Image (cartoon, grey):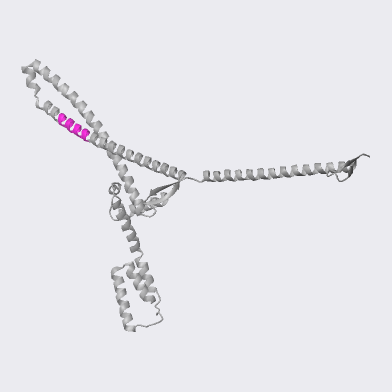
Amino acid sequence: MSENTTPDGSGTLSVESAAGAFLGLMDSAEEAQQGESETQEVEQEAQEQDETEQIEEQSEEQEKPTTFRVKAAGEEREVTLDELIEGYQLGADYTKKTQSLSEQRKAVEAERTKIEEAAKLRDQYAQRLSMMEKILQQQNKSENLDVLKETDPIGYAVKVAEQAQRREQLSVIQAEQQRIAQQQQAEQNEKLQSHIAEESRKLATAIPGYADPKQGDQIRKDIRDYAKSIGWTDQELANIYDSRAVLSLYQGMQYAKLQSKKPEITKKVNEAPKTLKSGVVQPRNQDAESQKKVMAQLKKSGKVTDAALAFQRFIT
């Protein structure tokens, strides 16, 4: 076995010892290298973590919405960009709708003005047609062609032709007058239907159940029956176009129903048992006198309120 000296020269070193020492050196070197690698990994992880935190902070800053300070309804507040855009869109939509309604209103007013102007021109045209009709009729009546036929045959022929022309003109005028009359009648009917619809809406608001299909028919029938019972004719009822007249008939009908129940209420009041209320008792004579006055008032007026008062006197 060969021998070597130790690294410090203090003695000899066997081959086995030298191999062991070399292996030890190798292990130490590997451990040192491994430790250095672990340190680098830790440092790299720390660096990556710092970078990640910085990115997250930047993302949070970027994700934080930008706010704007606005004033609405006299109050200042902060809003986001999305809220600002939404508010602008709502305002723009409201403005657009308002402008649209305004334009529609102007269009309706312009159309109404046109209709009114057309109606005025038509009325003036109708008046002129009427004047021309009267003039032509008068001219045909004023001419006596019998004498002219004997004395002036040529003049007679001319006058006959003129009268024929005037009669033709009268036919055209009368046809035009009929057309205008039909147009005026159609407009009047349209206005009447619109008026009836508006008055019906008023009655539906004033009379409970009037707009109901079944209950409303019964109410209208009851009103007609009541109106006939107090002297209204079918023709008069057919020409009622004012909701106030119908409402007056309805109120009269309701009052008549209350009046019809008056004898029954009076009978119940008279038959009601006389009881005394516990507590302070009025003198007998004073109570009897008061009761007589109440009953006298009830017999005189026949009102439901007086009947209720009399009934209260009985039970108290």
Q: Main secondary structure of the magenta part?
A: helix
Toward the left, the furthest residue is: 151
Residue 267 to residue 209: above or below: below
In percent of width and height, residue 243 lies at 30, 50
* 58 relative to 193 in the view: left or right: right
In percent of width and height, residue 169 lies at 18, 24
> What's the residue at 28%, 70% (across, down)?
300
> What's the residue at 34%, 59% (across, down)?
254
Of residue 141 and residue 10, the one placed in the foreground of this image is 10
In percent of width and height, residue 232 lies at 28, 52
Of residue 36 and residue 4, the one placed in the foreground of this image is 4
Toward the top, the furthest residue is: 154
Where's the C terminus, which quadrant?
bottom left
The magenta segment is 120-133
Numbered disc total = 0
Of residue 67 and residue 57, the one placed in the foreground of this image is 57
Can you tell which quarter of the image residue 314 is in?
A: bottom left
Where's the N terminus, which quadrant?
top right
Toward the right, the furthest residue is: 1
* 76 relative to 58 in the view: left or right: left
Residue 209 to residue 178: above or below: below
Can you tell which quarter of the image residue 106 is in?
A: top left
Q: Does the magenta segment cover residue 127? A: yes
Residue 156 to residue 98: above or below: above
Q: Does the magenta segment cover residue 62? A: no
Of residue 196 and residue 118, the one placed in the foreground of this image is 118
* 26 relative to 313 in the view: left or right: right
In percent of width and height, residue 17 lies at 88, 43
